Structure formats: C-alpha cells, structure tokens
Amino acid sequence: DHVEQAVDDLLLRLGIDCVDLLQFDVPHRYVPRHELGEDTYCWGLEREDEMAIEEQLVILQRLVDKGKVRYIGLSNETPWGVFKWCTAADQMGLSRVASVQTLYNIMHRNEFESSGFPEMLWNLNVPLLAYGVLAGGVLTGKYLDPERFNPRGPDERLGQDEWDNAVATYRTQLPEDSGYLSYGPANGRCNKWKESYSTHRSVWAQWLMGELVKAARQFGLTASQLALSWVYSRPFLGSAIIGPRTIGQLRESIRALNYPVPPALEAVLHDLFLRYRAPTMGGPQVGTQLDDLDHGQLISQSEFMRWGRQPIWSGGTYWPNWPQPLVSEKVDYLRKREELLELRAAAADTDDPSDDGAFNVRMWREMLDDRRPGEYFAVKEQKLFGWDEKKFADMDWKNLTRHERESQDHFDFHFVWRGDK
C-alpha cells in the first residue's frame, strides 16, 4: 500500500496520469555497492530482501494494471538479481523489468563488463540505462591537474619519507587508491560536494584520465565527446542519463550521438582498459554498510582491510600488509600516532605543509623602508626557531645530516620589488 501511495503522491506532484518508468534505487538485500567503489563481496553482511522478489512483482504489476505505471525497472542490481527478477516474472506470467540502471562509463566499466552483465542483458532483452556517463564532469577532463602528476607512479605517494620513523612500519604504507584529488573549478559539482564521484578522482583515475584526453585529441575529439560517444555506441545500451547544466552542454551531449567510434579508437581504449582495469574501485567512500560506526567517519574498504574491522571478504586487498597485526599492536600504533600528531602540531608542522611534506613554509616579511617600494626580507620559521638544524624522527628531535642541511638550505629569501609591483 505504501508503494502505491508513494506513486499516487508522485503523480499528483508532477501533474501526470502515468509514470513511464518506475525503478527501484538499490536492492533491499545486501549487495556490494560497486558504484561507490566496493569491489568485493563481504561474507557476513548478507541480508535477505525484506520482501521476496515475487511479492514485489505482484505489487508492481498491480500498478501497471491500474495504468499508474507503464514499465518497471531496476537500479544498481547484480547479475543474479536481474536474472531472478526476469525468471520470476516469466514463471508468474507477469511483466518483466524493462531496463537496468547502473553506473557505467569509459572509466568505470570493469565491474559491469567483467561480471557477465552484457551477455546476460543481451539475451534477456533487458537494456542498460547508464548513468554517470561523464561522472559528474570528471570525464570532461576539467578536474585533471597537470601540475600534480606523480612521476613515480600512481602507487607511490609523495612525501612518504615523513613516515620513516619508529611509528611507521610496512603496515602503514599507503596503497594506490589513497590519493583522492581536489583539483578543478571551485564551483564544480565534485568540489562542492566531495562525495560526488570521489571514486573517479583517485590517483589511478587521474592517470587514466590523462590517457583518455590524449586518445581523444588523437582522433579529433574532446574528452567529453569521447566519453559520451563511447557509451552511446555500446550495443547493450538502451539509453543514457545526461545532466546538462547549460544549453551548450545539452548540444554537446546530443551531437555526440553522431560521432563514430572507429576500430582504431576501440583498440586504443581497450588497451587502456587492460592497463587501468578498475581505477575507480578503491573501496566504498560514502554511504555504504562499511561506515566506521566507532568514530562516525566514512572510510574506504582498504582501511577496513588494514584494521580488520570486517568479516571475511571474498576478494583481495590492495594493502601489502599481511599478516594482520594483533589488536594490541594496532592500539599501540594509534597511541603513538596521536602522540606524533601532537608533537608535530606543537612544532607548527601541521599549519601549512608544503607540497613535499616538509615543515611549515609560512614566510615573515618585513619592509625596510615604508616610504618607498623596494626591498623586502623574508625568513622561514625553520630558521627563526632553529629547525634548519633539527628534524623529527623516531619520536625525537635529531640533528640533520650534512647532506640534509645542504639539500634543505633554502630558508633565506631576498625580494626586490620594482615599480610598485
């Protein structure tokens, strides 16, 4: 009854007589949320549907018979779920689902294609309704930062040496899914709402985005034209959900229907797919069953792997940290890490770190002559407090080596300003 009442309220608000397509948002049972980056099935979190699929079909068929709903569809389902819905409808003589809506784009395709979805949907005659084809604008390339391209590779972290002390062990090394980036327009959707397509902004995803931009230019396309035309050309696609904000974006989305994807381009994209198989699957970031209930923080699947806060998983982990440490070791690590952060905060290390993870680089400037623009003198805080001779390591202050002093000899600055500039 509450489903029908919700549909009645929807029809009243929209001022229409019939809903063309009524879809469930997510399954009511436990399923891995691949659209949030959850790449493995977690044994121990199984939860059956609150209502059997057969009962749900009867309720939905009643809405179809009354003319309130024309078709029913699924969203974020698994291959098993789609097969179950179709076979149950056939056995009961009821209407099949008309489509399956899921996250699918040129960067997030592994979970869909490698699970057997294309073959099953093709044979069941259930087309794909793709959403996130531009991943909130990520696949336009506007969030790609060319100035922060890590030359050591996406599985390395700049500034890793700051953990080379007694607190850190091989168990604290960050994996390749650690670096979620925030470059791009401040008013962009993915910067205003950080949880929006955060899985598409990992270090691995940044590398793939750069390759996609190069591939698009090679064939005379923009990144958005490539992403749209590629999705449009999939044979199992029924339709794609687009979200243009301007007339220009709408025009671009429609014109991409006319752009072919030649075999040469398909070969390039397939090669990139093999090299960057699942760059968005770094672990669930928001809104999943894996929220950190102890601290109320949303953390990734890898973090659960690291601290052992989950039941047995069917898949692997990106962390090279097995065997897992004892609980006492984890508690000891957390205690030392808190002490480390307190000491670093007391030393102003956390005020405004530089790109290299070095100490605070805030500069104090003093004008020598207020009456004429001219010389300024700047000194970093390291020099003022003697930090140019010391470093924090092994839970203690230690003298810098000669090589370290020479490599960090950049504490004095001399500025000359000319022409009031």
Image (cartoon, rainbow, N blue to C red):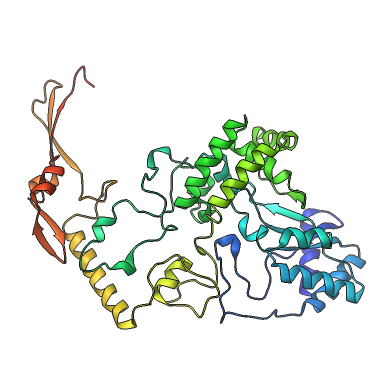
Which quarter of the rendering shows the C terminus? Answer: top left
- Please give the name of the residue rendered at 88% of the width and 67% of the height, measured from the top-left corner: 95
Q: 143 left or right of 68?
A: left
Using the image, determine if residue 265 lies above or below residue 109. Answer: above
Residue 170 coordinates in the image, percent (x, y): 31, 67
Q: Does residue 86 appear in the picture of this structure?
A: yes
- Relative to the observer, which residue lies in front, 28 or 124? 124
Residue 323 coordinates in the image, percent (x, y): 38, 77
Q: Does residue 245 appear in the picture of this structure?
A: no
Using the image, determine if residue 72 lies above or below residue 57. Answer: above
| Quadrant of the rendered image containing residue 413 | top left
Q: 367 left or right of 279?
A: left
Q: 329 left or right of 360?
A: right
- Relative to the observer, which residue lies in front, 398 or 219? 219
- Relative to the observer, which residue lies in front, 266 or 163? 266
Which quarter of the rendering shows the N terminus? Answer: bottom right
- Please give the name of the residue rendered at 79% of the width and 71% of the height, measured from the top-left corner: 85
Using the image, determine if residue 221 lies above or below residue 210. Answer: above
